[in-house]
Amino acid sequence: MINLNLYNKQHVIKKYQRTIFISDLHLDETRPDIAQRFSELLKNGDSSVDALYILGDLFEVWIGDDDDTPFYRQIIQALKSATEKGLTIYFMHGNRDFLIGQKFLHATGCQLLSDEEKILLYNTPVLLMHGDTLCTLDIAYLKARKKTRNHFLQTLFLLLPITIRKKIANKIRVKSMQHTQLASADIMDVTQAEVARVMQKHDVHYLIHGHTHRPMFHDFSLNHTKAQRIVLGAWHNKGNMLVWEATGKKELIEF
Ligand code: LP5
Ligand code: MN
């Protein structure tokens, strides 16, 4: 297959004719059951799917690749085993784990995607996002995002001792929980105008994202053509994934 440089990532060999998308697992050592479900998905994936896309918030919170705990080591090992066995895994930052960096990527073999990644999926152009930037009514969040995604502030943060970083992250989480409890559900959902804008910008009729935890297929019209936004679900009590087959069949599956 010739890479026309339109898409940064595309698989050359499509052996299994199906691709899996997941997001919002929020892996945390207090929920070993979710980590176990993820490990099982990785084990099965290496012999059945062309690629696994993780569209952000794999972890509940990530304060730097140097936060070395047995739990993180176990997840890194599971990812590493899967990529070594031949599973292609792509990772995109979410609003909880945007500090995942080169050390993690190198240790796991995952390939980092940009915040707006256009891929060619079985000949269909598809845009992938985490989804947070689509919620344009959530002004408080977007203001905070500017700070947390500032490269200089991130560098300063990463220079702090891990204990201090943990304390800051906890404070941000508390502030966030206060905000999300008070904010209306509408504010924390995507705005259709922003969905249309970003899809037009990338010239796609399919968008896959997570973040809002509202798994659903949304059909609409974009420039008088059928378009679809697919929202991935969070892994609260069950696993959630989108399976996209080469035939065009797409299914959101709880497991
Ligand atoms: O996560 P979720 O879905 O519950 O809520 C999000 C938005 N909240 C967040 C915050 C995250 O939950 C926690 C992030 C921890 C990061 C740790 C590393 C810190 C590194 C700092 C590097 C500089 O994303 C929430 C949205 C909701 O989604 C729905 O879309 O509403 O947004 C808010 O709650 C807005 C709050 O006001 C957040 C306040 C954060 C203040 C950040 C200041 C940063 C200053 C950094 C100084 C070092
Ligand atoms: Mn998120």
Image (spheres, grey):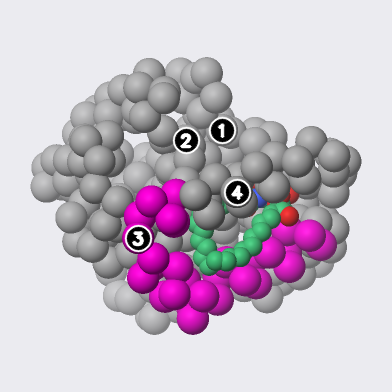
Return the x and y of residue 188 as percentages of the image width and height. Answer: 78, 46
The CA span between labels 4 and 2 is 21 Å
Instruction: Decide: is 113 above or below 54.
Output: below
Tag 4: amino acid: Lys
Circle 1 residue:
234
Looking at the image, is mark 1 or mark 3 nearer the viewer? 3
Q: Is residue 208 left or right of residue 137?
A: left
Give the mark nearest the N terminus, 3 or 2: 2
Q: Which residues are magenta?
A: 139-166
Amino acid type, residue under disc 3 in the picture:
Pro
* Disc 2: which residue: 25
Examine the residues drawn in magenta and state their main secondary structure. Answer: helix
Q: Which is more toward the observer, 206 or 62?
A: 62
Name the residue beneath numbered marker 4. 171
- For label 3, the SS is loop
Amino acid type for the residue under numbered disc 1: Ala
